[in-house]
Image (spheres, helix red, strand yellow):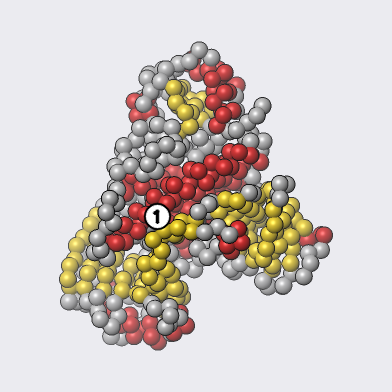
């Protein structure tokens, strides 16, 4: 079916995929003044929790947007909350091990933002509400059926899965945030590298009262070793809602083979509650794997999230890494579309994000090997979680340090420092370039398209002298720094921004 001329829709950016990463990308773009269009082939946001923990760095990025406060509020966990971790044949026993731990969500020495526990099924509606409030058009049951690109833009055909109508979208850029089997990535012919598959699993989400087999503190996570019904049981952020996952041989079975009757019998076995009556909310098959795309972009088409980095769930890094992709790509696309940067800036998306994503995917794989009690490959080590979530770096040097020590070096996350008014340095970032300055000598830069904050107390953490300065990007990463005042701040900053933004003027 050919699109009628009246069905041709021009947009600055077309985002294929309206789930976590696609909505995050649309949110960051709108925050920087660019309203994308989002198309999603499913009927709505995710019905399953999938990703459930979002790290402080992710909250730092979201905080500057209109969704940040609601995400933080919805996923808040009271400090001092204690959960239990169980290894047993069933919830009723025999017990192999039982330990409790206090959930720590706040590291005020490292970040002003907490970690939140919020299922993807609850986070996506918050993001959807936010992007729509900013004028972003999100269309569900809309499927990309093909696209072409040239030097002027991308021309995509979109099928309305309800009516069968086909429309054409003309966009300056296209973003594929369309999952691990990304049709956009496949259409571009981009291959993947990595350790490959660690096996397939099937999960079911259900409601049930398990209080009769609970212990002195709420159960957070259980490894169940029953020979006929082994797997894991995970608490969600909704009371009495649980996720049970087990291995599946996809060569022999499909999700359809796991009927509600079969799941009910299985859950009665693993919980040790013979008359359990669960209410089911759906089943899905997923693969634990380490695969990273060989390129994150091709011409005017970009990829983000699971479309370019699939990683095992160990560590909880996957969804967070996808949101970080979105933050990096969005400010760069906005800078180009708004005329503040040259198109060459977009080449830095692949150069920055691919090495970092590959290193994080490797860490998730190593954690998975460790959990399965397998030896780690020679020469490979597991680094601190803080190094993964806060310490990644762009440019020269390893993408991940072994331990996280904030340095303020260009290419790293701008450090969190409490200022006199109990405001964090990070509260100053997130919308345009920011210059942190320790001297009035930098005030001349205020005539430029950046904000200047002359404050004290941050310099040591950023590796500069009392009168130095640090230039921070819209995504909170350090772009440049100067140990002391310079002769002509406006001229120095102008030359620096021109180089950073690949401007020819």
**In the picture, residue 415 is in which quadrant?**
top left
Q: Which residue is mark 1?
A: 361
Front in this rendered view, residue 452 or 211: 452
Q: Is residue 184 left or right of residue 377?
A: right
- Could one spot residue 375 in this view of the protein? yes
Please indicate whether residue 231 sits to the left or right of residue 200 in the image. left
Looking at the image, which residue is at 43% across and 70% down? 286
Q: Quadrant of residue 431?
A: top right
Residue found farthest to the right: 5
In the image, residue 87 above or below residue 130: below
- Name the foreground residue: 294 vs 89: 294
Q: Secondary structure at mark 1?
A: helix
Q: Is 437 on the left-hand or right-hand side of 447? A: left
Quadrant containing the C terminus in the rendered view: top right
Q: Position of residue 281 (x, y in %)?
A: 45, 75
60 in relation to 202, above or below:
above
Q: Is residue 97 above or below residue 8?
A: below
The percent position of residue 364, horizontal first and vertical second, equals 35, 57
Measured as percent of width and height from the top left, residue 379 is found at: 28, 50
Q: Residue at x 50, y 54 (%)?
A: 294
Exactly how many numbered labels are in the figure? 1
Residue at 22 percent across and 76 percent down: it is: 89
Q: Quadrant of residue 398?
A: top left
Q: In this rendering, does residue 75 appear at all?
A: no
Label 1: few (<14), some (14–19) or many (≥20) C-alpha neighbours in 10 Å = many
Q: Position of residue 394 (x, y in %)?
A: 44, 40
Residue at point 43%, 47% (across, down): 356
Give the position of the N terminus as an image quadrant.
Answer: bottom right
Image vertical order of residue 110 relative to residue 142, above or below: above
């Amino acid at each position: 079916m050919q699109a009628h001329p009246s069905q041709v829709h021009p947009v600055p950016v077309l985002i294929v995929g309206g789930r976590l990463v696609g909505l995050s990308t649309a949110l960051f773009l709108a925050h920087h003044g660019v309203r994308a269009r989002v198309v999603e082939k499913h009927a709505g946001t995710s019905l399953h929790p999938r990703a459930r923990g979002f790290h402080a760095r992710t909250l730092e990025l979201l905080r500057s947007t209109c969704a940040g406060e609601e995400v933080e509020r919805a996923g808040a966990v009271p400090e001092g909350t204690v959960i239990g971790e169980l290894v047993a044949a069933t919830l009723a026993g025999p017990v192999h091990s039982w330990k409790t731990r206090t959930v720590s969500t706040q590291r005020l020495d490292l970040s002003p933002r907490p970690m939140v526990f919020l299922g993807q099924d609850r986070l996506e509606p918050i993001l959807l509400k936010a992007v729509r409030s900013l004028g972003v058009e999100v269309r569900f049951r809309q499927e990309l059926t093909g696209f072409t690109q040239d030097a002027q833009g991308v021309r995509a055909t979109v099928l309305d899965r309800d009516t069968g109508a086909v429309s054409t979208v003309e966009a300056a850029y296209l973003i594929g945030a369309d999952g691990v089997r990304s049709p956009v990535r496949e259409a571009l012919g981009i291959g993947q590298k990595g350790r490959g598959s660690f096996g397939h699993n099937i999960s079911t989400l259900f409601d049930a009262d398990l209080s009769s087999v609970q212990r002195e503190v709420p159960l957070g996570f259980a490894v169940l070793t029953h020979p006929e019904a082994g797997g894991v049981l995970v608490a969600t952020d909704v009371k009495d809602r649980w996720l049970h996952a087990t291995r599946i041989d996809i060569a022999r079975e499909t999700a359809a083979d796991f009927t509600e009757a079969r799941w009910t019998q299985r859950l009665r076995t693993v919980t040790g509650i013979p008359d359990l009556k669960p209410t089911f909310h759906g089943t899905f098959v997923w693969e634990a794997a380490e695969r990273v795309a060989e390129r994150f972009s091709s011409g005017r088409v970009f990829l983000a999230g699971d479309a370019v980095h699939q990683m095992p769930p160990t560590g909880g890094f996957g969804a967070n890494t996808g949101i970080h992709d979105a933050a990096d790509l969005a400010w760069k696309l906005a800078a180009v579309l708004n005329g503040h940067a040259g198109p060459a800036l977009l080449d830095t998306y692949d150069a920055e994000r691919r090495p970092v994503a590959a290193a994080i995917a490797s860490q998730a794989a190593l954690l998975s090997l460790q959990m399965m009690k397998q030896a780690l490959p020679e020469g490979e080590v597991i680094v601190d979680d803080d190094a993964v979530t806060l310490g990644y770096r762009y440019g020269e040097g390893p993408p991940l340090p072994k331990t996280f020590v904030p340095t303020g070096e260009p290419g790293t996350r701008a450090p969190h420092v409490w200022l006199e008014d109990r405001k964090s340095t990070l509260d100053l970032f997130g919308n345009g370039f920011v210059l942190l300055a320790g001297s009035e000598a930098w005030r001349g830069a205020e005539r430029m398209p950046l904000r200047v904050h002359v404050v004290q107390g941050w310099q040591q953490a950023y590796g500069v002298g009392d009168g130095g300065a640090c230039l921070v990007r819209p995504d909170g990463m350090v772009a440049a720094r100067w140990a002391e005042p310079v002769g002509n701040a406006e001229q120095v900053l102008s030359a620096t921004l021109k180089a950073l933004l690949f401007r020819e003027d």
